[in-house]
Amino acid sequence: MQEIGNQYPRDNTSDPSGFLKSARLHQSIYRVQVLNLPCGDYGNYLTKEDGEQGRNFYDGFEVFAALRERYPNYSKPLYSNMLRSEHIPFNMFVPLDKDKEYCRKVFADVLNIDIISVDAIKIEYAPLGKEKYLNDNTSFDAYIEYTHNDGAKGVIGIEVKYTQRAYSLIAKSREEIAIKDKNSLYYKVTHNCQLYKPEAIDVLPTDKFRQVWRNHLLGESMLLAGDSKFKHFTSLTLFPLGNSHFIETSKEYIDLLLSNDNKFIALTYEIFFELLSKYCPNDNYKDWIDYLRRRYIVFFD
């Protein structure tokens, strides 16, 4: 039996709720009990060798092949850190790309509309020609193009979180400069999309809301582009129930919107996995859903 390995002593400082600490331990135990692999620096890390073998990814539906195609060179946070969220979109959305009809049923339920078809699923995606949108490096963790029941094209831009909370701006970074410039595209798109209550602009750039706001703006900028084929956009944030930061932030963000007709959806892993089970087409996908639940659902006090 492998050892659980070192746990990070300052997890409770980073996340007083205790979820980060519990999730790190959960990934460490999964590595021991399910993967039976040694650890790296901490219990939630695979060794470089095991990371390069794809052990951080689901063994099926060509998930690791999709990862290697997109990121062929080894990256420790992506290949070996079981706790960080960067790998999760591959595990969750590459299998859905193999059966777009299955994906259509799930997201028709999520949006509560009659989606005609899912036309494309992409991981870590931003539209080309960024100067037409936000002119920065914002991208969607997962991206779904679909045909709406009105015949128009729509997009779901998905941000996948695990233990993350708010983050601070890096001093003198391009993002900080744009956030502080009231004439930047962030503010122009915010004004032009007409989604937000007037007082929202005072809090949207703060650490608590900035990332949700910025990802939402990327999708809205796609609708506003003069040559856009898209008529519908939904910003979806996907996170585990234990991440109290996004539970709270999502509720407060919705209150900043003038209305929320499928403009923003907060979806927990737990509900998402239930929907995956509801429309599960076969045993191969059942095995995958069982993996997702065992891998990412954390029970903690």
Image (cartoon, rainbow, N blue to C red):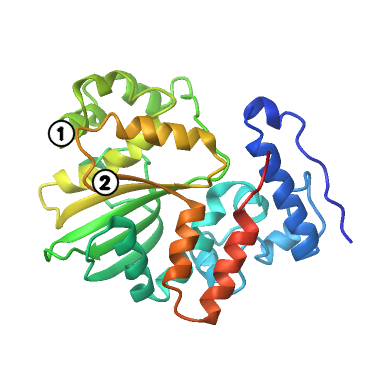
**Mark 2 residue crowding within 10 angstroms, few (<14) / some (14–19) / many (20+):** many
In percent of width and height, residue 109 lies at: 32, 62
Q: Residue furthest right?
A: 1
Between residue 133 and residue 44, name the one nearer to us.
Answer: 44
**Mark 1 — residue?**
194
Residue 229 is left or right of residue 50, and the answer is left
Q: Is residue 38 above or below residue 138?
A: below
Q: Quadrant of the N terminus?
A: bottom right
Q: Amino acid at mark 1?
A: Gln
Q: Amino acid at mark 2?
A: Gly
In percent of width and height, residue 204 lies at: 33, 25
**Mark 2 — residue?**
219
Residue 194 seen in this snapshot = yes
Residue at 64% x, 47% y: name it: 83
Between residue 222 and residue 68, name the one nearer to us.
Answer: 222
User: Which badge, 1 or 2, is on the more N-terminal residue?
Assistant: 1
Residue 47 seen in this snapshot = no
Residue at 45% x, 57% y: name it: 272
Residue at 27% x, 69% y: name it: 119
- Check disc 1 and report its element: helix, strand or loop: loop
- Give yes or no for contact between labels 1 and 2 (Cβ–Cβ under 8 Å): no
Q: Total label count?
A: 2
For marks 1 and 2, give the one nearer the viewer: 1
- Check disc 2 and report its element: helix, strand or loop: helix
Q: Residues under labels 1 and 2: Cα distance?
A: 13 Å
Q: Quadrant of the C terminus?
A: top right
In percent of width and height, residue 238 lies at: 45, 49
Residue 262 is left or right of residue 4, and the answer is left
Between residue 27 and residue 222, name the one nearer to us.
Answer: 27
* Residue 84: image tag: none
